[in-house]
Image (cartoon, rainbow, N blue to C red):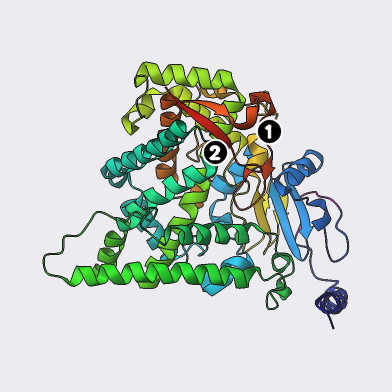
Amino acid sequence: MDLLSFILCVLFIWTSVQGLLSIANGTKASPGKLPPGPAPLPFIGNILKLSNQPHKSLSDLAKTYGPIMTLKLGQITTVVISSSTMAREILQTQDLSFSNRFVPDAARARDHHLISVSWLPVSTQWRKLRKILNSHVFSSQKLDAQQQPRCQKVLELIDFVHSCSKAGVAVDFGQAAFRTSLKLLSNTIFSVNLIDPGSDIAQQIKELVRGAMEEAGKPNLADYFPFLRKFDIQGIRSRMEIHLGKMFGFLDSMINKRLEMRKFHGYIKSNDVLDTLLSISEENSDEIDRIHIQRLLSDLLAAGTDTTSSTLEWAMAEILHNPQTLSKAKAEIEQVVGKGKPVEESDIARLPYLQAIIKETFRLHPAVPFLVPRKVDENVEVSGFTVPKGAQVIVNVWAIGRDPSVWANHESFMPERFLGSEVDVRGRNFELLPFGSGRRICPGMPLAIRMVHLMLGSLINLFDWKLEDGITPEDLNMEEKFGFTLQKAQPLLAIPIHV
């Protein structure tokens, strides 16, 4: 029996069993009034309503069925949130009821979901790990102390772009931003530069991170039909186990080296994340142990590279696509910082137009188009509807950022809309949620915001830019490629001209 026949046979048996169970439970009480949505087909539900751009498909469906709607994706009842009003209800008013994550099968590789702060339910252990991240990794005091290494990594990015300018070759913005982000994170975490030319692991780490993110972003039948998990018919979990295994092996080697160094008399502890976590573990192993340290470092490397690089690439694409925006940004930075100088963190507060460009980029191109799906453990009432126990809840951040009832000229890139506006990206304004909100807001947000402003501002101020192959700004391809992160379908390539 070939694989397809086997799958069809299993599905037929499952459908028959479900039909019998449905008859047997026919008198069972309804969970309540579900939010509206399209009628599901037998067995597959509404899966065919999703295209290869599901954020757009769900946005279109919301125009018919409303800002809170129900779909049946295979076996999984899915509630989709597509407005700032509904997002506030889910992420603020009833945040605790919607705080647990719907765990995809890919995250179950090597039991990552049982240990990772990204997937743990709200619990004592999750609170301990979040407290450590907020107090010892991403606190303002910690980030301020690491300003100089960040500035150094931006200067290295500038040096690279300057070399491209001399050679007359184009910069691949996504690649350049990824390398810079990984440099920063590796120095922040390990006090080591993983992108050092002499390092033979730089490319490996990059491939592992990208590979894991790609697997996490692929549609997986096991997430629609949980009884298929044991078969892993698409091989997603198996490939994820390989990526994670290599990543954990690398992290174990870094932890072992540091533990050996800490045994030497006279060892001076560094200010990096690894030493900080090991010290906390030594003082109180109930707070965090070695396996949690390993998984936490893995989450930091994965989450802090693709999202930052994607945001920078989209921001550069938009200002090259809109030359008048680039001219305004150049004028502001030249006046505040001085022509041809890199932007420093102390400058950011005095650059409102640069801040507006970043906000507008987050609005149109959130790095993650859906907040990581939530799962409710009990029936929850929302705006007169029932979100049933076990349902998956998706907040479509991409759709919220393009809601025409909130944003004038919602498809246009207009940073000016944020000048004089109190709206920001820190989870308090529900019409702009690139980092989420509430208990599950992205803990790395403070670092990401600093890095994107530094890189973008410096690239604007030190270089003029010419699109490759004679492409005009209006012809620049702005199509998206859906995945765990929302990237440009075609990499942005532009030739720098040193000012």
Of residues 455 and 431, the one nearer the viewer is: 455
Magenta residues span 32-38
Main secondary structure along the magenta-highlighted residues: loop
Residue type at numbered disc 1: Asp
| Left or right of 350 on screen, residue 364 | right
Compared to residue 297, the image places residue 94 above or below, namely: above
**Which label lies toward us, 2 or 1?**
2
Question: Residue 314: within the magenta?
Answer: no
Q: Position of residue 467 (x, y in %)?
A: 59, 29
Residue 288 in view, yes or no: no
> Label 2, label 1: how many angstroms apart (C-alpha)?
23 Å
Of residues 132 and 48, the one nearer the viewer is: 48
Find disc 2 in the rendering and name its residue: 313
Residue type at numbered disc 2: Glu
Q: Position of residue 15 (x, y in %)?
A: 85, 74
Q: How many marks?
A: 2
Find disc 1 in the rendering and name its residue: 403
Compared to residue 207, the image places residue 488 above or below, namely: above
